[in-house]
Image (spheres, rainbow, N blue to C red):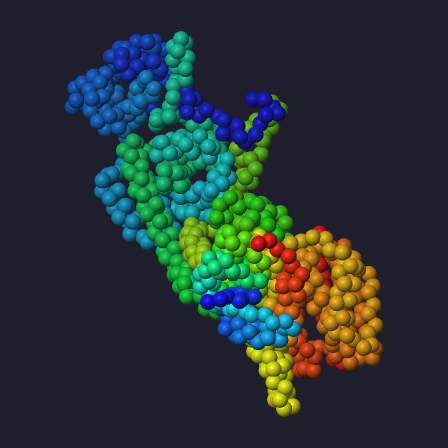
């Protein structure tokens, strides 16, 4: 072994199934399946035949058989005949074990396949314990299965197995996801120190050993101190024999050392499988050499298989109990979701919320740009960080971890609250999630010895690989982890997500439909107001014209009649103006904004002239400051400024002098125009009404106006994605602000 | 029947028709006006005029007529060879550029927006008379 190359992964590389050695409590012969020519033989055969095993390599099996003092009992067949005959029966398993007598002692012959070879293994049939398999097993099984709880069932199994095979210590060993083991049940002699609850590092049982545990469901190491026997073969075919299915297979020296360090002299293990994977082991340790025969091992194997299927079933049952409980919560939430259109309110009720569908201590809904928290959660800023992280890193619709701070290091700050997260994605694009948090659980793992196996310096000064010697409890503190999320919790979240998504989709559809209706209604209204205003103007114009006609053609009318006819004319004019304004307003709704650069100096001066001509102010000071150019629809922008300037001049007409100021300032991102006057002002209370159609304030009754102008301004400004607002003081004046985005 | 129509006016609004009849009386010169209320009927009359080899001095067409619109009617009249060079003026409340464009494109000689008020109307008619009856020259 290279001195610089010693590490525990070596344990994973050791080719233990082709070691070419067997344990010496029995012997092994391998023959070619067709010819029955001996291909491999264990050296310890000489104990039985007083001859060297190598002398029989390449010879036929019958030659060896002659040398062995064999009695096949009632069958009266030779071994060669036996394995040939049995070949045609139900496979090799069916014949195992075959009882025979060797030197007048009862022996079992176990036949297995290995490539082209058949392996014949002989081991004593007499054992340290004699078991009436059928009776014992039957009783044990009903004992074990009578227990409801998984933990209790395992404990029962340990006790029963201890009773059957009588080892000093029986441990049920459960493997975690990371491969490390934990003792979850134990039955032992009173004088032994308990191992219950101890953890063993994953490297204690290397990967290929785990694979073998899945194939050979039991494994015996009769005596760690016995000397193994080598398997020899002809030099020509120097390929090691594959001992995968062998029951005498020798154990890796590292494992032997491991057991020795533990004080164990004999060990027996039974594999526990669930869903085809190694769930755990029943490890039986004895503190003196101990051998149990094939039948007893087979009984234990059966027990292990029954326990395995019970495990699968019980685990499933416990999961489904938990699942049912959590699902009740989910179902309640779903009920709320069906009644309530507001997702936020449906998921956060006083009596039940998203926090109640799993073991989380805090939960948060990030939805429609709103963060709703319940229980212990990180703060909003931290949640936003998590959302950003999830948006990038979440590959599926549900993500969970019990060690978030180790994955997303920014979360270490709040590891106390959120070491475990379970996230469910509603929309990646919108960054909408439901996230549950579990607190940090500073786990105290008690290892059976320091899990970092030390490398030892041997007497010759080289580093050698050695399993640890100390099995004293060694405590490890694991931070930044929470309790794990179990399958039932995840299933509940998947279920809830489906329904939330459904409600969101349904809501989106409703909004879309409503939107279409609104659009339709809006279009109709637009057409309506356009047609109506147009059609209204014709008869109106006739009314006006008739009254004029009446005045013109009837010189004999008295003054009062003339006055009445004049009033009719004025009212008709006023109504005509109103209709024209509505027409303008509805035209803006239809028109597209056709943006172009606008020469503001020219525009404002032109409007100023028009307004002065129109209103004929008596005493006006009109100041034009800077007039930076802007982008916009020239016709519409003209309407905006005309309306505002017209208002400024109109509503300040009673001040002496009336003062109107116009100024523009070009900033980084926007250009702001101010139009201010020293007129009557606008009452604060009406701030919101000012831009509404047909709303006129009570202090401007004496001024002509329709209440449409500012509504037009607002509509145009909105179409330009610009902003308009004002400041005003009653009797002091008003300043309007217009902000246009610079292109 | 001897036709002596100077101004042939197609107008469906009886109010405006009535007002027009009055307003024409206010002109300094005597003008005879014939007002027809729909396009189909006016086409029949005009066709008959062509047969009788008679032309009014000016045709005024309202734009928004039921059935045949003013523009449709304009096209139909222009299709009568006898009225190819006849002065035709569109007379409408609409000042919509689209309408004006259509009228000019289909051969109207002018487009006049109906003024608001009786006095304005009289002024407008006087100027129409001054131009189309006095100043304007056309082909036969």
Question: What residue sits 43% from the left and 52% below the top?
Answer: A494
Q: Position of residue A662 (x, y in %)?
A: 79, 66
The location of residue A176, given as percent across then percent down, is 46, 43
Residue at x-position 28% and y-position 25%? A110
Residue A420, compared with residue A545, is above or below; it is above
- x, y percentage for residue A306? 30, 42
Q: Residue at x 56, y 70 (%)?
A: B32
The front one of A726 and A309 is A726
* Residue A656 drawn above or below residue A198: below
Give percent across and percent down for residue A533.
55, 70
Q: Confirm whether residue A506 shows in the render.
A: yes
Answer whether residue A441 is visible to the viewer in this image: no
Q: Is residue A736 left or right of residue A115?
A: right
* Front residue (pair A507, A622): A622
Name which quarter of the figure residue B119 lies in. bottom right
Q: Quadrant of residue A278?
A: top left
Q: Nearer the viewer, residue B107 or A534?
A: B107
Please, which residue is most extreme toward the front here? B2
């Amino acid at each position: 072994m290279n001195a610089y190359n010693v590490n525990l992964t070596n344990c994973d590389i050791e080719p233990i199934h082709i070691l070419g050695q067997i344990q010496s409590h029995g012997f092994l012969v391998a023959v070619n399946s067709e010819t029955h020519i001996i291909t491999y033989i264990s050296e310890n055969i000489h104990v039985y035949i007083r001859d060297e095993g190598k002398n029989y390599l390449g010879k036929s099996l019958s030659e060896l058989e002659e040398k062995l003092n064999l009695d096949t009992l009632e069958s009266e067949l030779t071994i060669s005949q036996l394995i040939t005959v049995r070949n045609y029966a139900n496979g090799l398993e069916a014949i195992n074990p075959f009882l025979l007598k060797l030197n007048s002692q009862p022996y079992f012959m176990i036949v297995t396949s290995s490539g082209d070879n058949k392996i014949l293994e002989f081991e004593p049939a007499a054992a340290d314990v004699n078991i009436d398999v059928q009776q014992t097993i039957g009783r044990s099984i009903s004992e074990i299965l009578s227990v409801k709880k998984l933990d209790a069932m395992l404990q029962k199994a340990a006790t029963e197995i201890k009773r059957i095979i009588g080892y000093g210590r029986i441990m049920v060993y459960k493997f975690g996801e990371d491969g490390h083991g934990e003792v979850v049940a134990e039955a032992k002699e009173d004088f032994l120190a308990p191992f219950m609850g101890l953890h063993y590092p994953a490297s204690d049982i290397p990967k290929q050993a785990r694979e073998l545990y899945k194939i050979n469901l039991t494994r015996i190491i009769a005596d760690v101190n016995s000397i193994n026997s080598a398997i020899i073969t002809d030099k020509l075919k120097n390929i090691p024999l594959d001992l995968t299915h062998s029951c005498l297979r020798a154990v890796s020296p590292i494992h032997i050392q491991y057991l020795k360090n533990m004080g164990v002299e004999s060990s027996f293990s039974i594999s526990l499988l669930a869903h085809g994977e190694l769930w755990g082991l029943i490890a039986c340790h004895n503190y003196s050499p101990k051998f149990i025969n094939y039948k007893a091992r087979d009984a234990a194997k059966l027990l292990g298989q029954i326990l395995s299927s019970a495990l699968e079933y019980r685990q499933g049952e416990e999961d489904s109990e938990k699942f049912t409980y959590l699902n009740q919560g989910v179902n309640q939430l779903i009920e709320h979701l069906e009644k309530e259109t507001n997702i936020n309110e449906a998921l956060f009720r006083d009596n039940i919320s998203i926090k109640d569908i799993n073991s989380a201590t805090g939960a948060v809904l990030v939805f429609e740009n709103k963060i709703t928290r319940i229980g212990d959660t990180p703060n909003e800023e931290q949640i936003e960080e998590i959302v950003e992280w999830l948006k990038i890193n979440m590959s599926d619709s549900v993500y969970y971890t019990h060690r978030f701070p180790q994955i997303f290091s920014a979360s270490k700050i709040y590891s106390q609250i959120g070491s475990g997260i379970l996230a469910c994605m509603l929309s990646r694009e919108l960054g909408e999630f439901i996230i549950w948090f579990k607190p940090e659980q500073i786990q105290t793992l008690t290892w059976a010895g320091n899990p970092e196996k030390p490398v030892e310096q041997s007497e010759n000064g080289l580093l050698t690989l050695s399993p640890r010697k100390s099995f004293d409890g060694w405590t490890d503190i694991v931070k930044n982890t929470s309790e794990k999320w179990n399958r039932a919790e995840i299933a509940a979240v998947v279920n809830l997500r489906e329904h939330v998504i459904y409600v969101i989709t349904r809501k989106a559809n409703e909004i879309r439909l409503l939107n279409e209706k609104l659009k339709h209604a809006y279009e109709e209204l637009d057409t309506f107001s356009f047609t109506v205003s147009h059609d209204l103007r014709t008869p109106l114009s006739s009314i006006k014209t008739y009254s004029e006609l009446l005045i013109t053609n009837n010189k004999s009318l008295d003054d009062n009649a003339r006055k009445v006819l004049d009033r009719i004319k004025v009212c008709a004019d006023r109504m005509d103006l109103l209709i024209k304004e509505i027409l303008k307003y509805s035209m803006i709704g239809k028109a597209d904004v056709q943006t172009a650069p606008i020469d503001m100096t020219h525009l404002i001066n032109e409007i100023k002239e028009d307004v002065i001509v129109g209103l004929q102010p008596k005493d006006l000071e009109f100041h034009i400051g800077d007039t930076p150019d802007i982008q916009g629809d020239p016709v519409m922008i003209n309407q905006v400024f005309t309306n505002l300037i017209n208002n400024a001049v109109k509503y300040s007409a009673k001040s002496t002098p009336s003062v109107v100021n116009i100024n523009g300032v070009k900033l980084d991102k926007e250009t702001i125009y101010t139009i201010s006057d020293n007129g009557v002002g606008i009452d604060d209370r009406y701030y919101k009404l000012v831009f509404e159609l047909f709303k006129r304030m009570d202090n401007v009754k004496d001024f002509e106006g329709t209440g449409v102008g500012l509504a037009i301004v607002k509509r145009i400004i909105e179409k330009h994605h610009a902003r308009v607002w004002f400041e005003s003081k009653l009797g002091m004046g008003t300043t309007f602000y217009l902000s246009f985005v610079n292109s | 029947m001897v036709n002596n129509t100077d101004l042939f006016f197609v107008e469906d609004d009886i109010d405006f028709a009535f007002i027009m009849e009055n307003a024409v009386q206010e002109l300094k010169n005597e003008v005879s006006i014939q007002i027809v209320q729909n396009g189909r009927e006016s086409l029949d009359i005009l066709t008959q005029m062509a047969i009788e080899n008679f032309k009014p001095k000016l045709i005024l067409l309202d734009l928004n007529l039921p059935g045949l619109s003013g523009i449709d009617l304009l096209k139909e009249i222009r299709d009568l060879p006898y009225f190819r060079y006849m002065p035709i003026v569109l007379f409408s409340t609409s000042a919509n550029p689209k309408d004006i464009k259509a009228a000019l494109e289909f051969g109207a000689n002018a487009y006049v927006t109906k003024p608001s008020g009786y006095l304005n109307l009289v002024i407008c008619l006087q100027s129409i008379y001054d131009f189309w009856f006095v100043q304007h020259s056309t082909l036969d």
